[in-house]
Structure formats: structure tokens, C-alpha cells
Image (cartoon, coloured by chain):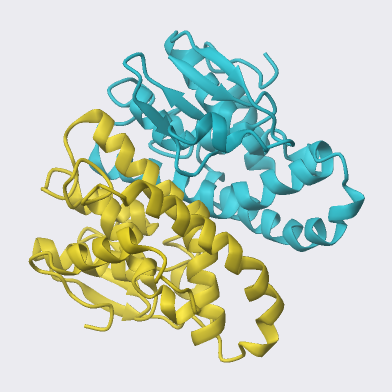
Chain colours: A cyan, B yellow
Amino acid sequence: MLLYNSAVSGNCYKVRLLAAHLGIPLELHELSVVDRSNRADVLGDLNPARRVPTLVLDDGRPLPESNAILWYLGDGTDYVPTDSYERAQVLQWQFFEQYQHEPTIAVVRFLLAYSGEPEKHAARIAELKPSGYVALDAMERHLGGRTFLVGERYTVADISLYAYTHVAHEGDFDLSGYPAIRAWLERVAAQPGHIAIDA
Amino acid sequence: MLLYNSAVSGNCYKVRLLAAHLGIPLELHELSVVDRSNRADVLGDLNPARRVPTLVLDDGRPLPESNAILWYLGDGTDYVPTDSYERAQVLQWQFFEQYQHEPTIAVVRFLLAYSGEPEKHAARIAELKPSGYVALDAMERHLGGRTFLVGERYTVADISLYAYTHVAHEGDFDLSGYPAIRAWLERVAAQPGHIAIDA
């Protein structure tokens, strides 16, 4: 399978991480997260939203959206529960991730560490930062007393939230007040087959 | 089942619409989308993100996030495909909805029509509006030549995108240049068991 990828993107890392767990080889086609001028040319026919990751299956069918890709690759394996309520809880956390977590924590990280012009984005960063902590607060409340997000087992929900939480410090987020999150990050990184975002 | 609901919320409407199709009765507990001061008290133990919709199953287990609820209620019915690629495509459009569509189109609609102080939010509205049209452009490209978003059948993906697209005019979005979207909106509204957002 071919993955349109950006090395620093947490959304792309989700796919690479699950593929590593499952032993699925991926051919990577690297796209820049800064210069997006070629996105319409490269992804136009594959993804109406023209974002990475976009997966292309061996038969040529495209599949965009990181969390949709996790379900496609993961359903039927140990990384997606079979119980209907637990499956819905996995989706709950993945939709939370795309709605409240990624647009704040990932965006602040990008503007600060990867945009090349953090000063220009100072106002936006200051505006987004509190919302990022709101998302971390929600995770901390939930993870207190739990080992993983859903069903006390490592699932694609953990992969989805790990992707940008474990690099939140690059967005200058301080996790010292989040002990449950920090313990959970260690548990995720200790899973068999784990790879780093820069592996 | 009990639904923590806001009448004007498209996210809540998604749940009410699928429940109507499926003949599932819902008890509604109404919360304001403007005064959110009681959210922690009411939803604190049910939803770490403290948003509506939050569904409470008959056995008391809570389930937040509109699109996760659609999967919980819809999987195994005609509204969720069985084919694994089509299931992933449904998720693709639902994650697109929560990432690119709802945060622009729904937010502009809220600020303009429901916040009670549209003037105060004029700059934010002007900033979000072009991103809303980017989302509509992506839908239009995909719906051209198709009857529904996935598999040429009405699915929960259509319910998810219909919710805020059909009231986009309340955010002053002009759909006159989007013929494929307008025809699709009519097809969705013509489905058996359809109910209006203010039903």
C-alpha cells in the first residue's frame, strides 16, 4: 500500500504506527506540510480534502483521513474491540481527537516548531493554547484510574491520541500537571512493535 | 434512551434524525448552546468533553460524540454499509465533517444566528467563512455524478454532512454555486422517515 505521508505529521504517524504493529509494509510518498502548493495536483483525484495521510490500496482505491485508515487496517485485529459499545467508545475518542485535540495541540506545535515563522503566529498560538489544555484536561480526567482509553486495552483510540500528545512539548505544552497522561504515554510507548514518530 | 440535546445543534439533530429513521424513541434533556455554565454539573460524569449530544443508554452507560452515536445506533442496519472499504469511507466523511465542515460552517452559523451578538464576532466570522467554502468545495467535487456520499446509498455519512449543510444559509453561506450539493440535500430530505431539525 502507498501512503502519502509527511514525516512530522502526527496524523500520518498514526498510520505508520498501526502498520508497524500489524507488520504491514507501506511505501511512503513524502509531501511537505509547509509548502502545500502541489497538494491539488498530487492528491486531487484521491482525496477531496487534499490532506495527508491519504492511503492508496493495492487495487488503487484511495482512503483519506487518519482515523478512517486506522479502522480500515485495524478492524478485525486486536487493535479494534469487537463489543459494540467499546467500538463506539473508540470512535468517541477519535472524534474528540479530530475536533478538540488535533486542531489545538497539533496546530500550536506546527506553528511553533515547524512553520518556520512562529513569531508571525504568536497571536494564534496564544489563542489556541488554552483550548489545547482543555483537551488535555478531558484526557486526564478520563485516564485517571484507567490504563488505556477504552476497555482497559490498547486500541486504535490510544494510537490516535498518542500521536500528538507525545509531542505536545514541541508546542510548549507542559504535561507536568498531567500524571495520568504521562503514565499512559509510557504504557503506549512500551507496546510490542512500537515505533517512534521519527523512526 | 436519554439524549442530552440542544434543539438548534446540528450535531444533536444527527442523532434525532437517525433515531427517527430507526423508530428509536429518545427522551430529550435540553441544554442551552449559549449559556454553557451548567455543563460540568450536568455532563461531568458522562462526557469528559462536556458537550452535547451525549446519549445515555438504558443501562446508564454514556456515549458522547454525534458520529460515534450514529455508529452505535446504526451499525447492523441499512444506514451503515457492511463492506469494509465502504465503512471506512463513511468514517472518512464523518472525520472530514468534524475536522473541516463543522468547525467552519456550524461555527459561523452559531455566531451569526444564535450567539445573540453577531457584531462582536464579525472578525471571526470573516476568518472562518472561506474555510467553510473550502469544505463545501470538497463536497461538491465528490458529489458531482454521485447520488450519496458513499456506495450510492443513503448512509450515516449523509446524515452527518446533511446536519449543518442544510442550514448553512443561516451562516450566510450561498449554495447557488453548488448544484450537486443542492440536489443531494433534496435527496436526503426525501428519505422515508426524514424529520426536520425543528421537528
Tally of numbered tags: 0
Q: Residue at x 70, y 47 (%)?
A: A107
Q: Is residue A174 visible?
A: no
- Horizontal side of B195 relative to B43 (left or right) equals left
Q: Is residue B194 above or below residue A71?
A: below
Which quadrant would residue B167 be assigned to in this image?
bottom left
Which quadrant would residue A91 be assigned to in this image?
top left
Q: Residue furthest right?
A: A119
- In this view of the protein, which residue sits in the foreground, A41 or A129? A41
- In this view of the protein, which residue sits in the foreground, A179 or A190? A190
Quarter of the rendering occupied by the C terminus of chain B: bottom left
Quarter of the rendering occupied by the N terminus of chain B: bottom left
Across and down, in percent, residue B156 comes to: 25, 53
Q: Residue at x 7, y 66 (%)?
A: B192
Q: Is residue A102 above or below residue A138?
A: above
Q: Residue at x 57, y 48 (%)?
A: A139
Across and down, in percent, residue B21 comes to: 12, 63
Q: Residue at x 42, y 73 (%)?
A: B168
Across and down, in percent, residue A87 comes to: 31, 39
Q: Is residue A91 above or below residue B127?
A: above
- In this view of the protein, which residue sits in the foreground, B29 or A163? A163
Q: Is residue B158 visible?
A: yes
- Horizontal side of A93 relative to A140 (left or right) equals left
Across and down, in percent, residue B87 comes to: 26, 37
- Horizontal side of B165 relative to B107 (left or right) equals left
